[in-house]
Image (cartoon, grey):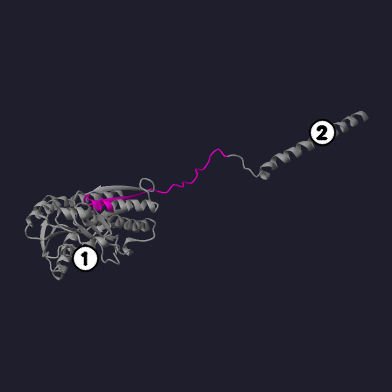
Amino acid sequence: MFKQKKSIKIFQSFLFPLLLLSVTACGQQSATPANNSTPAPSTTTAPAPSTETKQLTIGISQFVEHPALDAAREGFISQLAKNGYEKDKQVKIDVQSAQASMDTAIQIAQKFEADKVDLVLAIATPTAQAAAQTSKEIPILFTAVTDPVEAGLVAAMDKPGANVTGTSDMNPVEEQLKLIKEMKADAKSVGIIYSSGEVNSKVQVDAAKAVASKLGLEIKEAAITSATEVKQAAESMVGKVDAFYVPTDNMVVSSIAAVIGVAEAQKIPVIAGEENSVKSGAIATYGIDYTKLGEQTADMATKILKGEAKPADMAVEVQVDMKLVLNKKAAEKMGVTIPQAMLDRAGQVIE
């Protein structure tokens, strides 16, 4: 009996430490997850949030290609990039030309509406009218539009009132006609060729008529319906006019070489509504810079794209800085000597 009790005591003394060790180990194991600051890795990982900005789309509708409108387009695209909207990066730019067709201008406007572009730039009055008639929600900016109120694009220059606003290229017509008298004091009549289908052209013809009499000039008109009629219209005025005035009429400017050809052959000076026409062979202009006009329009577009302004509340802007541009070579070909006083105050002289 004594031996049996002694064996049991020896067994208990051996078993108790083992049980204690087992309980302690279990306690430590179960506490590990609660005390560990690094959770066990998960088999599924949530995708990281995207930091990419949605690429915007701008549709550009240009009525016809000629240096002035091209300059406005390139100025717009260049300034947009400087403002943080670089082509093919932050913004996709879809450039379309109506090729002087109103039907095509409407088709382009319908395309932009269907594509749901973020903004439309309409270059020249016909494309601006097509865009405004087609889209009532998409922000529309125009440039190279002479009289947006007369064209039915805005309710007022200071408060457009809808989804359309932009920049006007209204010329200082009186100052431009004065250049004719300064170069040719005995000039009595001025011939103006213009497109009967362009509102902006009619506005400039009316402005010329309004100031002509006080300058001792008579305005003679020749209306055209297509660019192929420009040369014939110029020839019809030979012997009837002492000078030509070419307004910023898109159809006439796109075919200005025809006017220049007649003018050089007949020694009739040509005054233009903008500087690119002077670079193309006219003698002089006092007017705006279309590249800067495009840049000015891009600054307006930037405010719209950033959500800082709406077209309805953005006043139509005009360019304030004007400069006198002269072409000496053109003057020689047309039999005119540019007075030294004009050369002295010119902002640019083309030799």
Mark 2 nearby-residue class (10 Å; few <14, some 14–19, many ≥20)? few
Instruction: Name the side, left or right, on which 316 lies relative to 260.
Output: right
Q: Which residue is at 69% across, 41% downward?
A: 30
Q: Position of residue 85 (x, y in %)?
A: 38, 51
Give the mark toward the camera: 1 or 2.
1
Q: Quadrant of residue 130?
A: bottom left
Q: Which residue is at 11% across, 55% downward?
A: 267
Q: Quadrant of residue 315?
A: bottom left
> Front-most of 213 and 70?
213
> Front-most of 198 and 79?
79
Q: Does the stretch in magenta take in 67?
A: yes
**Label number found at residue 175:** 1
Check disc 1 and report its element: helix, strand or loop. helix
User: Against 186, is 108 above or below?
Assistant: above
User: Against 5, is 251 above or below?
Assistant: below
The span picked out in magenta is: 42-71
Q: Earlier in the sequence, mark 1 or mark 2?
A: 2
> Front-most of 235 and 115?
235
The secondary structure that most of the magenta stretch takes on is loop
Check disc 2 and report its element: helix, strand or loop. helix
Q: Position of residue 279 (x, y in %)?
A: 22, 52
Give, as a three-letter code, the residue at label 2.
Leu
Identify the residue under disc 2. 15
From where the camera sits, is residue 137 visible?
A: no
Q: Which residue is at 21% across, 65% downward?
A: 175
Give, as a three-letter code, the residue at label 1.
Glu
Instruction: Name the side, left or right, on which 52 lies relative to 135.
Output: right
State the separation of the CA atoms marked 1 and 2: 117 Å
